[in-house]
Image (tube, helix red, strand yellow):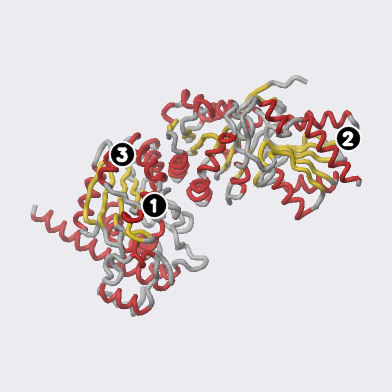
Amino acid sequence: MENFVESREKLIKNIEKKANIIRRYIIEMISNAEGGHIGGALSIADIMAVLYFHILKVDPENPEWEDRDRVVLSKGHASAAWYAALAEKGYFPKEELLTFDHINSRLQGHPDMNKTPGVDMSSGSLGQGISVALGMALAARYLKKTYRTFVILGDGETQEGQVWEAAMVAANYNTDNLIAILDYNKLQLCGETNTIINIEPVIEKWRVFGWNTIEINGHRINEIVQALEEAVKFEGKPTIVVAHTIKGKGVSFMENKVEWHSLAPTKEQAKQALKELRHSNEKGF
Amino acid sequence: MKNKLIATRTAFGEALVEIAKERKDIVVLDADVATSTKTSIFKEAFPERFFEMGIAEQNMMGVAAGMATTQKIIPFAVTFAVFATKRVCDQVSISIAYPELNVKIVGSYGGIPTGKAGATHQAFEDIAIMRAIPNMTIIVPADAIEMKQAVKACIEYNGPVYLRCIRCDTPVIFDENYKFEWNKGVTLREGKDVTIVSTGMMTPEALVAANILENEGISVRLIHLHTIKPIDKEILIKAAKETNCIVTVENHSIIGGLGGAVAEVLSENCPVLIKRIGINDTFGESGSLDDLLIKYGLNAKNIVKETKELIKKKLR
């Protein structure tokens, strides 16, 4: 038991390190690109770290492996977080992150499955990723495959009607191999999510739509780990992990500030941000 | 001439079952219109391969896309043409066409014939919408024989396709020896005074019109384009050079469909007089099929009249 606790602690520490590195890459990429959606990328950094460094059965050497777990970033504008995790996992050289958002880059502003190794689906138009993930989950069942499909949703995104079409159909088919993660950072482009259009009560909504729900703090690695471990084991229903997060998490002057939805830090601001994360960017990647 | 009458939607449903017997990778998604689109035939034959998606077309397109990402399933996403294009335009564009996924989108109830349902169910701009989306192939078979071959051909092709079906019975004009050629126009009749270019269910009607015109001493070339995109430029440019005027006939708006496509090709390569026959930038209405075809000018009589006027204009 002691060993388990010890190894668990080690695991959590390791993932925390990875999350920190992902945050660093996000800041460097977006600052270098002078564009990108930094707030919503930082809010899913911990979730990405847990997925790629603990949960997912994937092989960066073989991104097209047919039995791999699938990831769909339905909130495609947070692509920087995904690219950071993929680079850290070894899907492509970290140096390539500096091409993000530049002409002819494999790293588009929004994910492109035909350009970026490890990106399982193109996305960018909100509300569509969850349907695609459901298709992947139904395909797994049809093909008798055991891969799991993870889809990351934005909170504002759930204002799209298509999300609820998918939610209803997923429950109808009992796709327990489908796991949604809601990045509930409470902010969207123009302001507070629940002031723009109230999405509460969130848990109850998903529950009455027929989903298993787990509510966590989306920045506590141990909670994310536990929730996703539970979610993949859960049988009979799709699961949504409602992760309470902070937009811009990790950088004091970005946290909970709506203007950092899509704003690139200046060189000075990036330096300050990296300092807060205990990184120096002198060496770049 | 007595042609057999078969609806292309029925031919589609039957063809799918036939091919699916040999291929386990074919599945069908439908949005609660299976008895109308005739995927009900497939559902009966392969219940485990039929996915009812309910009245939620946007989700259906995404689910089809997700299945196709495995490259081990070829999903047919089927609903009425109005929904398969207009309602889900962004889903088709972003989740299917942009990632070039191997999804076959089938729009049933193309154009005028909807069983008196009226304007809300009459797809007059589906082809125009799909034509503007990159990576999309658009196929509009003329009859049941061609539909069966088209279904096969689009399964063999790896990429998104929009296939248009018709609700009502239409004449079978091809025989079993007919060979569907991918992206190639079909010359049904040679002629030198005028070329009629038609697609879908208007091709049988154009054949009737061409016969009438021939009897009146006008030499008509008739080209059937089963594929609107990519369009067979070569056959069109040759026809324009050799006959100097073109009539297009389609069960669709004259904006952005066959007529639009032909006009684009010819204005850039061999400008000649063109008359587009189709729905004249208006919404439809309920009515019997015959009444509708007459009112909207989609009958042989009107094709004859417009063709003669165009030839007169050319000679002026």
Task: Quote the CA–CA distance across marks 2 and 1.
Answer: 59 Å
Other-residue count near label 3 (Cα within 10 Å), few / some / many at <14 / 14–19 / ≥20: some
Task: Kindly indicate whether the residues beneath marks 3 and 1 are on one polypeptide chain.
Answer: yes
Q: Which mark is residue A209?
A: 3
Amino acid beneath label 3 = Phe
Tag 1, which secondary structure?
Answer: loop
Q: In the figure, B123 relative to A194: above or below?
A: above
Measuring from the top left, give residue A32's x and y in whole percent. 41, 73
| Amino acid marked by disc 1 | Ser
What residue appears at the point 84 percent right and 42 percent down from the top-left corner? B310
Q: Is residue A247 left or right of residue B240?
A: left
Looking at the rendered structure, the kind of residue marked 2 is Ile
Q: Residues within 10 Å of mark 2 (few under 14, many from 20)?
A: some
Residue B199 visible at all: yes
Identify the residue position indicated by label 2 in the image: B218
Q: Residues within 10 Å of mark 1 (few under 14, many from 20)?
A: many
Instruction: Return the x and y of residue B266 as percentages of the image width and height.
Output: 76, 51
Chain under label 2? B
**Residue at mark 1:** A74
